[in-house]
Image: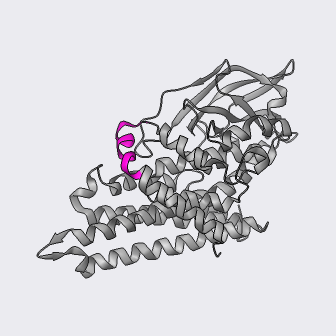
């Protein structure tokens, strides 16, 4: 896929924002495990949260690929900021845009597009993991024109910030004739009685992003808060994740590229045994392999995005992009840390954060094992 003039300009502006606004301060936020509200506010002013949202709802009217480019550039500097944008748009706003009623879109999307509020998607449960339908225990029952929700969710990004506005909650709303659960998605505004947000997790990485466990105890919301058709929640989730995997692949490519960027700067400054370490072939080969991984992973997510925008099937391509890109991020973070030596183990250097942040990319929005399973199924192998 070739970038058009708008994509090139967007990429340049986000690159400058990441370098000039995010990079100088994000390390302190990360160390304090503090959500970067000021950075998020500035991202909202730039229109980043509204990139793929139509202008009629206050967005930029761009495409999903524009979001991916922004994520890549942000993740070259920091993944906490990038995942905040990714989850807010891909998991928070896009389901409402794709499946919501006109009233739901008008209520939520303008504020989401402006970055005034963040949305979240409550899917994963404490005992569920990758087995979403089999592990789901959260229920929603209609009573007097209201949904009564009971259950809990785990590892939900953007769910407990001061500007979180709404969470889409996947819940069992009945049983099908074959006994399988009927799963629907219900929009629950923040502050609704019976909706409790836990303290932030203490995480290995993504320390400046917000991730929490949620619980629902006789939580009541109006019947019209149903998102899309009743019983189509799981199908909505699968479509959302297919798109989200392309976005996570872009974020992974950004982290992998950031490892190359930082390593190139370091090897031109660091001297050992009387010369710059960038003159040693062992170091050169490491960086060459890192660059090759980035290039390959970027091509994979560009290809998946191209098929998605063209309306072609892209499930396999999205899974490949997510698998290849997350592997590249993890491998490059390990190699960058090795190049930096002892300094790579210090949090004051970006590669220390990159190393901590990379692992979750092989887990979140579908583990690497799930991606391999999806690819195998798309090749016609038995489930």
Q: What stretch is highlighted in magenta?
A: 23-34
Residue 191 within the segment the image draws in magenta:
no
Is residue 235 in view?
no
Point out residue 314 in the picture as x, y percentages from the top left corner: 72, 66
* The one of 317 and 5 positioned closer to us in this rendering: 5
Point out residue 271 in the picture as x, y percentages from the top left corner: 17, 71
Residue 24 within the segment the image draws in magenta:
yes
The answer to whether residue 308 is left or right of residue 284 is: right
The quadrant of the rendering that contains the C terminus is bottom right
The answer to whether residue 248 is left or right of residue 222 is: left
Residue 374 picture quarter: bottom right
Residue 202 picture quarter: top left
Q: Which residue is drawn at 42% across and 36% down?
A: 34
The answer to whether residue 374 is left or right of residue 79 is: right
Q: Residue at x 69, y 57 (%)?
A: 242
* The one of 307 and 350 positioned closer to us in this rendering: 350
* The one of 248 and 71 positioned closer to us in this rendering: 71
Q: How many labels does the image show?
A: 0
Point out residue 91 in the picture as x, y percentages from the top left corner: 66, 46
The answer to whether residue 98 is above or below residue 106 is: below
The answer to whether residue 269 is above or below residue 174 is: below
Point out residue 276 in the picture as x, y percentages from the top left corner: 20, 75
The quadrant of the rendering that contains the N terminus is bottom right
Colour scheme of the picture? one colour
The answer to whether residue 276 is left or right of residue 311 is: left
| Main SS class of the magenta portion in the image | helix
* The one of 30 and 38 positioned closer to us in this rendering: 38
The answer to whether residue 37 is above or below residue 300 is: above
Q: Which residue is drawn at 57% across and 38% down?
A: 158
Is residue 41 in view?
yes
């Amino acid at each position: 896929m070739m970038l058009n003039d708008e994509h090139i300009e967007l990429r340049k502006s986000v690159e400058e924002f990441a370098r000039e606004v995010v990079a100088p301060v994000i390390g302190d936020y990360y160390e304090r495990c503090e959500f970067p509200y000021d950075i998020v506010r500035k991202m909202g002013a730039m229109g980043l949260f509204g990139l793929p949202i139509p202008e009629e709802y206050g967005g930029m009217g761009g495409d999903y690929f524009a979001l991916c480019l922004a994520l890549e550039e942000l993740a070259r500097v920091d993944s906490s900021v990038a995942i905040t944008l990714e989850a807010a748009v891909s998991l928070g706003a896009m389901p409402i845009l794709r499946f919501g009623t006109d009233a739901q879109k008008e209520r939520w999307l303008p504020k989401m597009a402006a970055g005034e509020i963040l949305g979240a998607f409550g899917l994963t449960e404490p005992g569920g993991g990758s087995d979403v339908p089999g592990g789901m225990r959260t229920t929603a029952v209609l009573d007097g024109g209201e949904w009564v929700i009971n259950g809990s969710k785990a590892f939900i990004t953007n769910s407990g910030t001061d500007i979180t506005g709404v969470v889409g909650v996947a819940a069992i709303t009945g049983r099908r004739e074959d006994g399988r659960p009927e799963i629907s998605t219900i929009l629950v505004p923040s502050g609704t009685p019976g909706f409790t947000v836990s303290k932030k997790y203490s995480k290995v990485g993504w320390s400046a992003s917000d991730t929490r466990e949620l619980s629902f105890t006789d939580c009541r919301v109006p019947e019209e808060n149903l998102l899309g058709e009743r019983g189509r929640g799981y199908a909505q989730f699968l479509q959302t994740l297919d798109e989200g995997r392309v976005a996570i692949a872009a974020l992974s490519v950004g982290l992998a590229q950031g490892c190359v960027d930082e390593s190139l700067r370091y090897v031109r400054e660091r001297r050992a045994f009387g010369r710059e370490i960038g003159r040693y072939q062992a170091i050169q080969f490491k960086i060459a392999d890192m660059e090759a991984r980035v290039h390959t992973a970027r091509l994979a997510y560009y290809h998946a995005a191209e098929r998605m925008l063209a309306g072609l099937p892209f499930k396999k391509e999205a899974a490949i992009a997510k698998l290849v890109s997350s592997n590249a991020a993890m491998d490059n973070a390990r190699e960058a840390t090795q190049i930096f030596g002892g300094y790579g183990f210090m949090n004051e250097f970006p590669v220390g954060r990159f190393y901590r942040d990379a692992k979750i990319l092989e887990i979140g929005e579908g583990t690497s094992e799930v991606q391999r399973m999806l690819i195998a199924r798309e090749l016609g192998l038995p489930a």
